[in-house]
Amino acid sequence: MRALFAFIAGGLFGSGLFISGMTDTAKVQGWLDVFGAWDPTLAFVMGGAMIPMAIAWIIRSRRDTPVLGGTFPPPAPREIDRKLIIGSIMFGAGWGLAGLCPGPSLASLSYGGIEHWVFFVAMLGGMLVAPRLSIRLDRPVPAE
Amino acid sequence: MVMDWVWGLVGGLLIGLGGAVYLLANGRIMGASGIIGGLVDGTGRRDAVERVTFLAGVFLLPVLLYPLYSSVDTHITGNWGVLIAAGLLVGIGTRIANGCTSGHGVCGMSRLAPRGFIATVAYILAGGLGVVLFRHILGVI
């Protein structure tokens, strides 16, 4: 049952990415390119996605457990650390460079061509080495 | 142009609905980088089945939708160096920051998580500067 609902959730996510045009790298780069032909589509996608998600968080606050049992995710951590900033900057640079982020990179694999596979495999490689880099960033900054 | 925005909104609603199902039914946050990354580095072995079926849905639904469209061009670069560099940056960056556009953006900001907003501002700024640098100054994309 958990697998079925995970598949439904993934299917909704994948169709949404496809229908919204977020697997089109030109649309993503068009959103980021404020000095070129700026394309605001991504703002509609993000805004549209936040509506059901915000409602889901409200419903979550009124329930003790998920429908299929288990536990809800812990409250959002409040700590802003180096890893959040450095990681997000690296992610943003790659996102701008290719116009793909993790979700759309998977959603576009079936029809995007070999280039999408090259990006996807490189991304998996990055995810494989990330824990080692992450540990280094956990070390405290040496005191002056 | 306006139709693109309408489809963007419709697609966005579906994305959010997916996140809502994953949260309320499975009790999980729908973050693409976390779901994929947990399988890659082994930290998500415990709930691997759930992760794999989620990812199967993400992969397969576009396969079903694709024939309904007359043409789908992803406009991706043919430069493998750029693709590999970008893939590595996205893979490393999202795992270090513990989230991407879906986790920090959609799921984080919709519950008013400070980390979600800060991450989103950081990756959009870096992406915008990246496009300016690589497209308008260096001309590689």
Image (tube, helix red, strand yellow):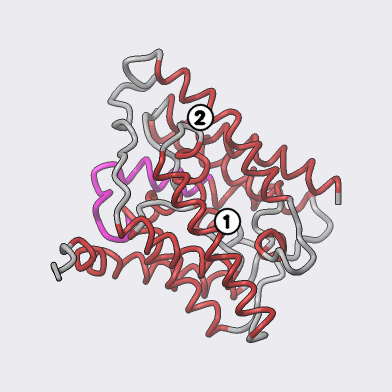
Q: Is residue B136 magenta?
A: no
Q: Residue at x 41, y 51 (%)?
A: B99
For disc 2, the marked residue is B20
Q: Residue at x 50, y 73 (%)?
A: B86
Q: Residue furthest front?
A: A144
Which chain hosts label 2?
B
Q: Which residue is at the front of the view, B81 or A87?
A: A87
Magenta stretch, residue numbers = B39-57
Question: Residue A109 occupies which quadrant of the picture?
Answer: bottom right
Using the numbered discs, state the Cα–Cα distance from disc 2 to disc 1 in whole angstroms. Answer: 18 Å
- Check disc 1 and give the amino acid type: Pro
Q: Position of residue B117 (x, y in %)?
A: 47, 45
- Callout 2: 10 Å neighbours few (<14), some, many (20+)? many
Left or right: where A123 falls relative to A71: right
- Check disc 2 and give the amino acid type: Ala
- Point out the image quarter for the N terminus of chain A: top left
- Above or below — where is B21 with respect to B98? above
Q: Which residue is at the front of the view, B113 or A59?
A: B113
For disc 1, the marked residue is A104
Whether label 2 touches label 1, CB < 8 Å: no
Which chain hosts label 1?
A
Q: Position of residue A79 (x, y in %)?
A: 29, 44
